[in-house]
Image: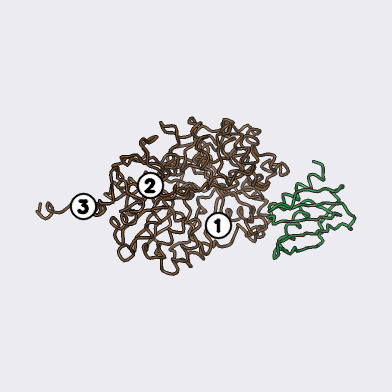
């Protein structure tokens, strides 16, 4: 199956570099995904790259990632997601788990 | 008094049955036995065009041989039958309408044939009476939909024609009682004929013919959920349910269905539930089939009583070894009974919890899609507030006390309410949004000429929605406008969810009507499979001490 690659940048108001070390969470099992979070100097932005077999849901991905970045006031971060049909619920859960791991709590 | 009244005949039904059975007498041997090869001829002798006929079968056991034989009768003699039966899951159930043997259908559950039901209605091959719940259809067997001929199934018959339905008794007693005591005809297919039965479930004088089927009846292990397939996201929802609803209301008496969410809850009781100190406080009395995923909770001493709608393949020995928990006969095997389990489900539950394909902005939910007449089985019996209920339990009372608008209907009179919970991820399979503006059921009503859109649970019965966003305590909403706002607040990234106003959601959270996982005290990062008491079918076998014997398709070791 052809894979789609989505790339976009996000910016949260009052964001800061929360993630200090590289973290990796999840596996690309069916209905699941993996995420890599890496601190990177991006002038306050968060850059996102998503590889997914699903097409036609670009806006949904953007909304989910926007919420995650805004809710947690993230900045200067690189996010890489390898998806295998995860629902938005799973996406947010995995992102939140990765963030908790990165923040060390 | 006039003589015409005195001369009226009062036994036409039994006379008609006697005449039909006389036609069939040459096929019926000692012990009411009929040879399998004579079955079609037997049916042609006892069934007449336009009869009301029941083929036993629900979502589990099926009188499949008799159904196949009914489809082979001479269509010039037997046609336009009115089928009244729980379910139509087998292809042959719909073939009857294709061939013209049957014309009208009253049922409760379509299962895999749901698409053909809708198609046949559109094409005029099938006239739909109504979609019922199981209990509702059973009620009509005793009022205005009594079968003239019923084709049932049992495990064993003895040489007199007594039947053993055992573990999978399910619908049989209800069908037989309605049919036989209205002078109808009952024909049974059995897997074997033996000298002595373990116990008599149906006495022989209620049975007219017994056929040893060429092969055992079909039965589906519908209630087996492999713990290996439970996702972290389902575990998160399960933790929210346990802490935010089960513990909050002290839910002791409840039903679990076949969903993965409730399987996850079952497998979290001995771990997360134990940690929260809930043993003995929740899930003590349950109406459900013997789910394998209940084994760890039962073994850990959580459960006092379980009554079953039906059986579950592989659980026979385990259940027989736990008679303190299950309803077991003097012979030592389970007796399930769908009518009694559904009655308990309607009147005696504190809570119903289930999933659905769609919930509309008002809180109405349905599993109907635009092209499938699926029916709802038993869910609506339990997923509603039983208006005839008068006994009080703590959680029923608490749920009622939280209703802010009860005084608008009852003045100062207090009343309880059943908890009815929908647990869903905001997006389902194929990223279809679960929260929608209008249910597909409306489209189906149009496509299949239904009087009403088929609704599984109406919004006024629904008390709680659980999603990954948190819990909406709809029973705490004073009016429809607030309910709609609470639904939007937990609808995530669906269009319905995106229309939530942050200010409004904030007010709902302050009022305790909407709670996020954090407000409930559930740590999202703990939502993973290490929380499950059993992580595989093999773990379940181990928990059962080797008594659970999973069907081959679930054995991967």
Q: According to the image, label 1 marks what residue?
A: B362
Chain identifier of the residue bearing label 1 in the image: B
SS at mark 2?
Answer: strand
Q: Chain of mark 3?
A: B
Q: Closer to the N terminus: mark 1 or mark 3? A: 3
Crowdedness of circle 2 by 10 Å Cα count: few (<14), some, many (20+)?
many
Q: Earlier in the sequence, mark 3 or mark 2?
A: 3
Residue at x 55% of width, y 55% of height? B363
Q: Residues within 10 Å of mark 3 (few under 14, many from 20)?
A: few
Say whether marks 3 and 2 touch (CB < 8 Å): no
In the picture, residue B126 is in which quadrant?
bottom left
Chain A: give its colour.
green
Tell me where residue B144 appears, x and y as whole percent.
Answer: 32, 54
Q: Position of residue B264 (x, y in %)?
A: 62, 43
Q: Which mark is residue B15?
A: 3
Q: Is residue B223 left or right of residue B557?
A: left
Look at discs 1 and 3 and give the one toward the viewer: 3
Q: How far apart, in angstroms, are the residues tagged by discs 1 and 3? A: 54 Å
Residue B324 in view here: yes
Above or below residue B481? Residue B541 is above
Which residue in the protein does label 2 denote? B212
Image position of B555 (left or right of B164): right
Relative depth, front residue between B80 and B549: B549
């Amino acid at each position: 199956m052809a894979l789609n690659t989505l790339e976009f940048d996000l910016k949260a108001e009052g964001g800061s570099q929360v993630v200090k070390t590289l973290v990796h969470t999840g596996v690309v099992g069916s209905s699941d995904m993996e995420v890599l979070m890496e601190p990177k100097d991006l002038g306050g932005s968060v850059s996102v790259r998503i590889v997914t077999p699903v097409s036609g849901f670009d806006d949904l991905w953007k909304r989910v990632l926007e919420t995650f970045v805004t809710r947690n006031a993230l900045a200067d971060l690189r996010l890489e997601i390898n998806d295998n049909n995860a629902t938005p619920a799973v996406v947010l859960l995995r992102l939140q788990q990765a963030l908790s791991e990165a923040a060390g709590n | 008094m006039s003589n015409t009244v005195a001369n009226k005949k009062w036994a036409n039904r039994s006379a008609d049955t006697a005449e039909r059975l006389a036609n069939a007498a040459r096929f019926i041997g000692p012990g009411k036995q009929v040879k399998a090869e004579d079955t079609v001829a037997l049916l042609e002798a006892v069934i007449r065009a336009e009869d009301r006929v029941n083929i036993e079968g629900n979502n589990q056991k099926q009188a499949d041989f008799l159904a196949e034989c009914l489809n082979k009768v001479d269509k010039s003699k037997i046609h336009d039958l009115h089928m009244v039966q729980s379910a139509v899951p087998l292809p042959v159930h719909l073939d009857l309408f294709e061939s013209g043997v049957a014309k009208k259908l009253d049922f409760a559950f379509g299962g895999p044939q749901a698409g053909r039901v809708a198609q046949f209605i559109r094409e005029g091959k099938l006239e739909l009476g109504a979609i019922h719940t199981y209990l509702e259809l059973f009620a009509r067997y005793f009022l205005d939909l009594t079968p003239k001929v019923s084709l049932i199934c049992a495990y064993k018959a003895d040489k007199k024609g007594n039947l053993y339905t055992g573990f999978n008794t399910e619908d049989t007693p209800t069908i037989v009682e309605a049919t036989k005591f209205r002078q109808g005809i009952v024909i049974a297919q059995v897997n074997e004929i033996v000298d002595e039965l373990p116990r008599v479930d149906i006495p022989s004088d209620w049975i007219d013919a017994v056929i040893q089927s060429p092969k055992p009846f079909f039965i589906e292990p519908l209630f087996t959920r492999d713990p290996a397939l439970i996702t972290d996201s389902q575990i998160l929802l399960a933790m929210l349910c346990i802490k935010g609803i089960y513990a909050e209301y002290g839910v002791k008496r409840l039903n679990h269905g076949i969903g993965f969410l409730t399987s996850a809850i079952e497998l979290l009781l001995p771990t997360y539930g134990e940690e929260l100190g809930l043993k003995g406080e929740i899930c003590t009395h349950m109406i459900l089939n013997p789910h394998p995923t209940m084994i760890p909770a039962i073994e850990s001493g959580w459960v006092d009583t379980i009554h079953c709608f039906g059986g579950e393949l592989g659980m026979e020995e385990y259940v027989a070894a736990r008679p303190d928990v299950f309803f077991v006969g003097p012979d030592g095997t389970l007796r399930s009974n769908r009518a009694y389990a559904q009655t308990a489900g309607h009147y005696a539950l504190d809570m119903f919890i289930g999933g659905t394909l769609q919930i509309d902005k008002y809180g109405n939910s349905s599993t109907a899609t635009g092209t499938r007449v699926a029916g709802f089985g038993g869910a609506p019996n339990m997923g509603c507030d039983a208006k005839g209920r008068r006994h009080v339990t703590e959680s029923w009372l608490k749920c009622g006390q939280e209703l802010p608008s009860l005084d608008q209907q009852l003045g100062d009179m207090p009343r309880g309410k059943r908890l009815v919970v929908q647990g869903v991820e905001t997006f389902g399979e194929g990223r279809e949004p679960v929260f929608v503006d209008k249910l597909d059921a409306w489209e189906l009503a149009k496509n299949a000429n239904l009087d009403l859109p088929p609704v599984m649970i109406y919004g006024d019965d629904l008390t709680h929605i659980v999603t990954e966003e948190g819990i909406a305590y709809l029973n705490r909403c004073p009016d429809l406008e607030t309910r709609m706002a609470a639904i939007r607040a937990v609808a995530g990234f669906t269009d319905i969810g995106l229309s939530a106003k942050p200010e409004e959601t904030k007010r709902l959270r302050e009022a305790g009507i909407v709670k996020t996982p954090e407000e409930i005290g559930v740590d999202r990062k703990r939502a993973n499979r290490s929380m499950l008491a059993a992580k595989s079918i093999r773990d379940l076998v181990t928990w059962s001490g080797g008594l659970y014997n999973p069907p081959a398709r679930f054995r991967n070791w």
